[in-house]
Amino acid sequence: MDLEQLFGQYKEQSIEGRYITLDKIYPILEKLNTNNQLEIIGKSVLDIPIYKFQIGTGKIKILLWSQMHGNESTTTKALFDFLNLLSGDSELAKTLLKAFTFYAIPMLNPDGAKLYTRANANEVDLNRDSQDLTQPESRVLREAFECFKPDFCFNLHDQRTIFGVASTGKPATLSFLAPAYNDEREVNETRLKAINLIAGINDVLQNYIPGQVGRFDDGFNINCIGDTFQFLGVPTVLFEAGHFQNDYWREETRKYVFMALVSSFEILSENDIVDSRFDNYLSIPQNKVVFYDFLYKNIKINYDGIEIITNFAAQYKEELIDGQICFNAYVVHISELENYYGHFEYDAKGAIYQDENENSPKLNQKANFYLNDKKFVNGVLVQSL
């Protein structure tokens, strides 16, 4: 199967970028709702509807949810690409709809999506509320889980640009986790199903993003929803959509999430899971915090009247300004940066640092500066003077 071609055919063209709100996805839900598959299953803190879209008649029941964290929208885009596929008339769609029943919650946290925040309107991280269930959104998801009784859960997230695949120097474009179900992080039959599925997904993705698939840390926290559902006996797969080179809007990453979803259900529909692929799962390198957005090496600065050579790093903050996501770069680290990488790296070779006010960078200032005759604005080299 040509997954690249499939993505191009079913990509939902009406949504792109990072700022995905309910206003943007509701017209798509209406378009897809050809047979009363759409339903309001609850309300957010700010009384905004939370929707489910259910499709398929198969015996294997799949629960998927996205934007539990409001500023994590990549998987939402890919989920709609996948729903477009299911709503088409291809043989693949017919096969999947016959094998599965899909219960999708495209936006669990519409308030956080509007505010572009991780938390909900009460400033609660829903992914730490799976036991206390203090928030309406958390209760909506738990009720969906208990009523639908899924055979597999797909917990769809984004991760920051700081994550790399171990120490390879490659970004973790997609990462996966079969969450632990106890403190000892043991592997029972439930968790093994998720482990085997991830190993199969990784086999496919290595053909497209070799060396750019990571494995998320499996420290157990019963307050996290994936750990809870795994504890309750339902195989759960955590998706973490990360950075692809020069893809801050995550349109490339979106494609690989779509590929991973399609591959997941192909594997499950064909029952293409061997007894144990635990070793294959463990061979997926772990995520490691090894990246900055910008890394500047061998900078000459004046420190207390003495010229020294140092390095510094800058990182984007994603800031919602007038309804638009702006990537604003700030200095976050000054000193040796051994074993770190930059998505953009610049070797100044001893060039002198200068900005409007200082002759050395300061933490938390905007990354606007000069290195000799090179001008950098918002972290980016814009011109030579």
Image (cartoon, rainbow, N blue to C red):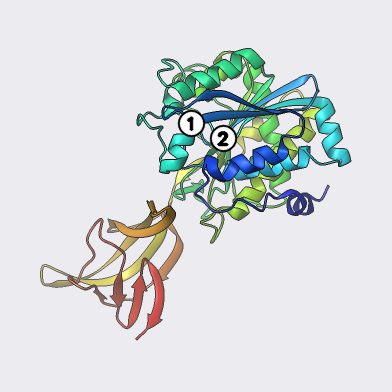
Type of amino acid under label 2: Ser
In-image side of 215 versus 88 (left or right)? left
- CB-based contact (under 8 Å), mark 1 and mark 2: no
Direction from residue 266 to residue 233 in the image, left or right: left
Number of on-image labels:
2
Q: Nearer the viewer, residue 192 or 339?
A: 192
Q: Vertically, is 334 above or below 175?
A: below
Q: Residue furthest left?
A: 305
Foreground: 242 or 70? 70
Q: Is residue 13 above or below residue 216?
A: below
Q: Would you call the spot at circle 2 few (<14 residues within 10 Å), some (14-19), or many (20 or more)? A: many
Residue 220 seen in the current view = no
The answer to whether 319 is drawn above or below residue 295 in the figure is above
Mark 1 / mark 2, whichever is N-terminal: 1
Amino acid type assigned to the residue bearing label 1 in the image: Ile
- Residue at the disc numbered 2: 66
Q: Name the residue under label 1.
A: 48
Disc 1 or disc 2, which is closer to the eye?
1
